[in-house]
Amino acid sequence: MPTPGPDLTVRDLISRLSALDPDTPVRLAINPFFPMAHRLADVVLGEDLDGRSTAYLAEDPKAVQYGHLPRSVAQALTWMPPADPPRTTRRRLRAVTPLTPDEKERY
């Protein structure tokens, strides 16, 4: 199991969000194995299991799952590998001999 990285702090979050248009909606990306987007409703300050002061982002109870996470977002989060377009091979057609009268009756 991979070791989690350092916690994202309020300072980090503000810094990253301040680079965006302030009218941009915010969604929470959940579950890399079944990527879903959730609407946020509130920010609540509390304590984590170690007793540290922690900011919790609460999802909107009226819209629990907003929908599937866009593939481009899941790829940016490295939850999904980039998709290559399907390979196409040129089909070769064989020459078909005309049907005999007996074969025509069967079809």
Image (cartoon, rainbow, N blue to C red):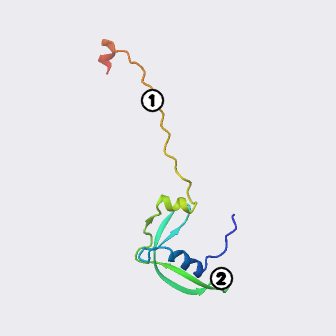
Q: Which residue appears at 61% of the width and 79% of the height? A: 9
Query: In terms of secondary structure, where does tag 1 sit?
Result: loop
- The span from disc 1 to disc 2 (Cα, nearest Å) is 61 Å
| Percent coordinates x, y for residue 77 in the rendering | 56, 63
User: Which residue position holds label 1?
Assistant: 91
Q: Quadrant of the C terminus?
A: top left
Quadrant location of residue 56?
Answer: bottom right
Most foreground residue, 14 or 100: 14
| Percent coordinates x, y for residue 76 in the rendering | 54, 61
Q: Quadrant of the N terminus?
A: bottom right
User: Which residue position holds label 2?
Assistant: 49
Q: Would you say residue 23 is visible in this rendering?
A: yes
Vertical comparison of 46 with 99: above or below: below
| Percent coordinates x, y for residue 10 in the rendering | 58, 81
92 relative position to 47: left or right: left
Quadrant location of residue 81?
Answer: bottom right
